[in-house]
Image (cartoon, rainbow, N blue to C red):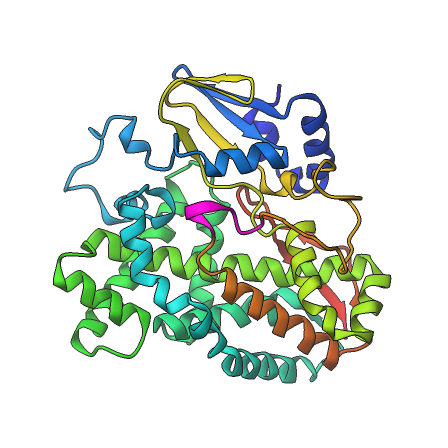
Amino acid sequence: MQSVETVYQSNFKEGAYEFYENLRKDEPITSIGSSNGNNTWLVTTYDDVLALLKRPSFIKDQSKLFSKSARSEEEPLETKIFHHMMLDVDPPDHTRLRKLVQPGFNPKAIRELAPRIEAVADQLIDEMKQKNSADLIDDFAFPLPIIVISELLGVPTEDRDKFRKWSNSIVSASDNMEGEFMNDVREFTEYLTTLFEKRKADPQDDLISNLIKHEEDGEKLSSDELYSMVFLLIIAGHETTVNLIGNGMLALFEHPDQLELLQHDFSLIEGAIEEALRYYSPVDFSTARWAEEDFEFKGVQLRKGDMVLASISSANRDEKKFENPNQFDITRIPNPHMAFGYGIHFCLGAPLARLEGKIAYQKLLQAFPSIQLAEDPKWRNMFLLRGLQELKVKL
């Protein structure tokens, strides 16, 4: 049995795939801790993760199970903001919230962003050409998606370094809602308050102005939901794409035969994106779900209120689903990975992430045909996500 401390330890990312492989063989659904009579379960096989993500009796809204007594109207915004995330609610609230932002992320809307994404990539590459080496995270993988999502939302791109600080703090935190973490959340919400006031006074052709209109109508979006939605879109709108670009480039560096294959045939670029998503999944674990009632799941007896986590990374390396799962193969067909989740909570921004990844890989490899890894990479200490702190390269 694994403890929560084992899963959270700072060097966990280095040995995670061996850890997952052992769990899939010996204890595919394992308890990683308990609290107040309820267990926390980790689900690791592809079929079990799929069943978990599909099953309605695993719910996202824990307020349906646990007392709300700690919440009140006087609760500060920086804690209340976490209670209305689209990611953490169930239908019908989830359906209503998703419909509000879905138009901005439909295939047609995303295709129309391609010229702007290419222009941003070209600008960043021009800056990189002025030097012999670079950190692909700082110089390319981070600024590309944060500029794109900022422009889509209507957030000043010059504030992107603030978002990085706040986002790093938020996605790296566990359940510690204190100290520096809460200070960063407070700064973030104060920033949004000022931005919302500007957009209410002077609406623009952007997603935030559109959401504010719904909030002012008072029917489709509450004030708390507005904060939570924009908060989520800013963070989720760039974090996973940063990881897709960085993790995928690392996989290519680690597999020079696949890098050479792609450089000689860019028609393989979409396959490379899908394999990068599978091999080094940007999201390591799904966000938590809870058992709505007592029931048996895949031979394990769950109690009402048990927390269940799906290991996306483990599912995407399951030897029963993927042939040679630890091999990075950009020609892999089929490739039914679950990097973007499954079901009603399937990642809203998946089309945008795929497009940004495709443009990023091709632009980088065309501009720097001799690009190579300069130093051993460093993984960030995050629980839910898998991403690099830095990726030093020779250009």
* Residue drawn at 71 percent across, 38 percent down: 17
Locate residue 146, reporting x and y percent.
48, 68
Quarter assignment of residue 167: bottom left
| In-front residue for pair 374/291 | 291
Query: Does 187 appear in magenta?
Result: no
Q: Is residue 149 above or below residue 51?
A: below
Q: Is residue 371 above or below residue 381?
A: below
| In-front residue for pair 73/28 | 28
Which quarter of the figure is the C terminus placed in? bottom right
Q: Is residue 358 above or below residue 34?
A: below
Quarter assignment of residue 188: bottom left
| In-front residue for pair 240/218 | 218
Q: Main secondary structure of the magenta part?
A: loop
* Residue drawn at 22 percent across, 77 percent down: 203
The residue stretch that appears in magenta: 339-346
Locate residue 288, reporting x and y percent.
44, 36
Residue 148 visible in the current orientation:
yes
* Residue drawn at 22 percent across, 30 percent down: 68
Count the marks: how many? 0
| In-front residue for pair 100/202 | 100
For residue 176, side relative to residue 8 (left or right): left
Q: Name, please, the residue furthest toward the right.
A: 257
* Residue drawn at 40 percent across, 14 percent down: 37
Q: Is residue 251 above or below residue 261?
A: above
Q: Name, please, the residue furthest toward the front.
A: 334
Locate residue 160, reporting x and y percent.
45, 69
Residue 188 visible in the current orientation:
no
For residue 171, side relative to residue 59 (left or right): right
